[in-house]
Amino acid sequence: MMQLHKFFPVLLLGTLTFGIAKAQKPVKNTGGWPVIEKQMKPWTRWWWMGNAVDKQNLDLVLKKYADAGLGGVEITPIYGAKGFEKQYLQFLSPEWMNILHYTVNKANTLGLGVDMNTGTGWPFGGPQIKPENAATKLITQQYQLKGGEQLNEAIKVKEAKQDFAQLQAVTAYGENGEVLNLLPKVGEDGKLNWSPGSGNWDIYAAFAGKTRQMVKRAAPGGEGFTLDHLDKNAVNVYLKRFSDAFAGKPQGIRSFFNDSYEVYGATWTPTFLEEFKKNRGYDLASYLKDLSSKDSTSENIARLKSDYRETMDELLLHNFTQNWTNWAHGLQSKTKNQSHGSPGNLLDLYGAVDIPETETFGSSYFPIPGLRRDAGDIRNVDPDPMMCKFASSAAHTGGKKLASSETFTWLTEHFKTSFSQCKPEAEQLFLAGINHIFYHGTTNSPSNAPWPGWLFYASVEMNPNNSLWPQAQGLNNYIARCQSILQSGKPDNELLIYWPIYDVWNKAKGLDMALKVHDVDDWLHPTAFYQLSKALSKSGYSFDFASDRLLKQATVKQALISTNAQAAPYQVLIVPQCEMMSPETLDKMIQLASNGAKVVFQALPKDVPGLNNIDVRRAQLKASLAKLTFIDGPNGIKQFKIGTGLILLTDDVQQALSTIALKRETLTDSGLQFIRRNTATGKYYYLVNHTAKDIDTDLTLNTVGQVLMMDPQTTAVGLAAVKNGKVRVQLKSGESLFLRVAHNVAANSAWVYLNKAEKAIHLNQPWALHFTEGGPSLPADQTLDKLVSWTTLNDPKLQAFSGTGVYTSSFNLDSKTAKEYLLNLNQVDESAKVWINGQEVGILWSIPFQARVGKYLKIGKNTIKIEVVNLMANRIRDMDQKKIEWRNYHEINFVNINYKDFDASQWNVMPSGLIGPVMITPFN
């Protein structure tokens, strides 16, 4: 794709009818495009290695970031480069605070925003976290006694380095089902002052021990134990260090950030038993035997652990997530949280912060011709759009404007990531409802650090030392244009799909259940919820996910379901097949229907979750289900009318939606994917072609009106051709397009469609190749009779060169009678900036490397200049072959995509430059 100067094509206007949003804040228009603000541009995670930052270098790099089209930075201090220790600043020290203030002020003058990690490295922790406030785990020890015996050892924790472990419960289990609380019988010295009268007894002791996990990748001044996220006092202790450093005053930070929950083995908190009894209604200490059991098949143990996991969810939500957010609001800042990986209900944890953030890890498969995906770049689990929808759903249902993503983490091996590979991954996020991309990321590097500068071990090197950087505006501006629309108005999703969290929690195996992006094959993919969501998406329905907590606060107005006063309402609630549901949630669903909502059950729930008061709660569920006196409706769908609403029961959810006349978007039948936004100026459709084929088709849209075509690669706009209510769309494989549908669309021109291709003009004159910047040294000029990878040319420097090469040539145009002319560069490794007859055409930075160039052509001789940048890979390969030291960092140092020591010396040379063939095709 490309960044192109605006052109105004020509065809005819047609008209497509439906609900357009009436009263929302109008979008500022410049030729159909909103004014780009910093929040709409891509931001980047910005690693401060060793906190070795200074004003002079900050001035340099921040200007480069702004000039390249970034909108903001997210400061995350980490470990440092060796040899620069004297320049390290201690985290939150007065010197560090001074440089933070300087950074915020300088960034703001450049139009950049600043976010900040509430810590260094990850997860939260540091020197203020003493053992008593550190991440906690449940330690259980088992003893056995027979009648008349006395325990001859003290009940003290046996695990090493557990000096701060607290004994919390001692429970004895007799062979006839007896359960005794022995904690009062244990002295301060650990001696058990009890002996069974008869029989065989198992005794379980529970301790609140410490995981001893330290902050990973910590920066100077940030080292220490990981925080106990489940304990409110511990969280307050942690945050007080920041409040003190800030003197309780706002720091100009837009948003405080928390990375994905990677707190390993933190299965407990000292108040767990107390909170469990208060919230679940029974004493967990009586169930220590089952809680520590390795039995993975027992129904009762599964129910017990479901209650345990629900309690952990509540502790994490209230004591950490909401507590941290309230703290940030007191500093006039927002919170941005990666809830995935947490042992709780992800939807609620995402929903408790201001900006829910997902992440992509690894690469996806796209059948786009020519898109490189090396076998070595494939992780165990591809990024999953449905996983990303947990974050965007929380934003949408909570009426929040932004849903962000940590983007491109390990997209490829180091130094091999092209803009072409970034584009579909970003688009997949947009289609999942994400509208605020953060690159992963950019390492702050001083000007005196030799190339490639300082680098983080899991980054795609979005920094000025990257040889692709001179053309980064192509990708950045594309993302900014997309996000300028995807952040406008409100989401336009008609379905709300219930997520049955109790089915996820109802497992006898393990203790805490961290719902990680890497483990979706276990907790997400096998579920009916996931399969139904995938099928509905493929068929052209739009939706968000809902939790039990969210439904509890939902209301109905004019037959639409409202989840928040600021959120767009939903037309139908979908309940996937699930085993477990609380009586309260079922009653709420029935109440929503009674108040006018439409509810579709794929199947009715079979049981209640948990152990507490199970007989009473089962009776409640049974009574509620008995109220649903369904009658047979059309197509085998069972119906129950209640109040002013309707409940449908069928395993064919799509048939049910058709029955109630809820239309799908049939455009997905073409292979296109979409997402909609509803604004004051109309509805926007974002269309993406990730198929292997070019698509030229007439689409029927559910929204009707005049249609404005908007190309986010080129900024081109024009009125679409509409005939018999269908809009014509042309999208090559790998391309995207916005359609704005409104009652009245203002545009100067009609969209130019490329209809009949005439004989192509092949640019087969010799090409002059001149290298302008890069290294290790500039190769000599070349003259090429045929375009090939510059690594195959007769200059030994070229196999090691990473940088910029400029190609120039000329061609003749006998006549200029076609409606439009399409330049096709074909193979480019990796990005190209084009001029024709001295006029800048734009940056062709992604597949299919094409641009409309009719306005730049003239009859007779034409000149063309193409500036091409290649990857960093070949230069890194050369440095490793020559054993030039360039990676020398503390902590993890620098690893490859498989977390092994990095070594590029055995890599194959990567193709580089303009490979073509280059041609111009006339279209009429």
Image (cartoon, rainbow, N blue to C red):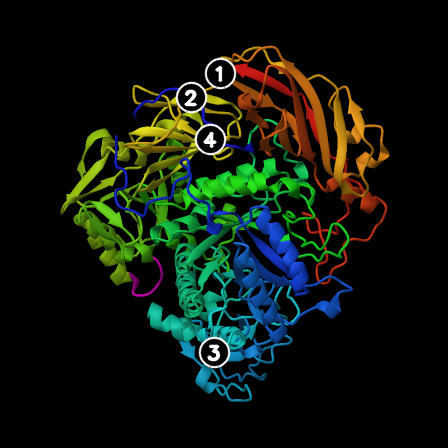
First in sequence, mark 2 or 3: give its number: 2
Tag 1 residue:
819
Q: Residue at x 50, y 23 (%)?
A: 694
Q: Nearer the viewer, residue 638 or 520?
A: 520
Say whether residue 890 is left or right of residue 485.
right
Residue type at the position of mark 4: Ala
Q: Are marks 1 and 3 in contact (CB under 8 Å)?
A: no
Q: Is residue 197 visible?
A: no
Q: CA distance from mark 4 to mark 3?
A: 72 Å
First in sequence, mark 2 or 1: give its number: 2
Q: Are marks 2 and 1 in contact (CB under 8 Å)?
A: yes
Tag 3 residue:
170
Q: Quadrant of the N terminus?
A: top right
Residue type at the position of mark 2: Val
Provide residue 18's location: percent of width, then percent of height.
25, 33
Residue type at the position of mark 1: Lys
- Dot 3 falls on a residue whose secondary structure is strand
Tag 2 residue:
10
First in sequence, mark 4 or 1: give its number: 4
First in sequence, mark 4 or 3: give its number: 3
Foreground mark, 1 or 3?
Answer: 1
Q: Are marks 4 and 1 in contact (CB under 8 Å)?
A: no
Residue type at the position of mark 3: Val
First in sequence, mark 2 or 4: give its number: 2
Say whether residue 506 is left or right of residue 426.
left
Q: Are marks 2 and 3 in contact (CB under 8 Å)?
A: no
Tag 4 residue:
716
Q: Is residue 819 above or below residue 435?
A: above
First in sequence, mark 1 or 3: give its number: 3
Provide residue 515's location: percent of width, then percent of height.
49, 54
Magenta residues (range): 609-614
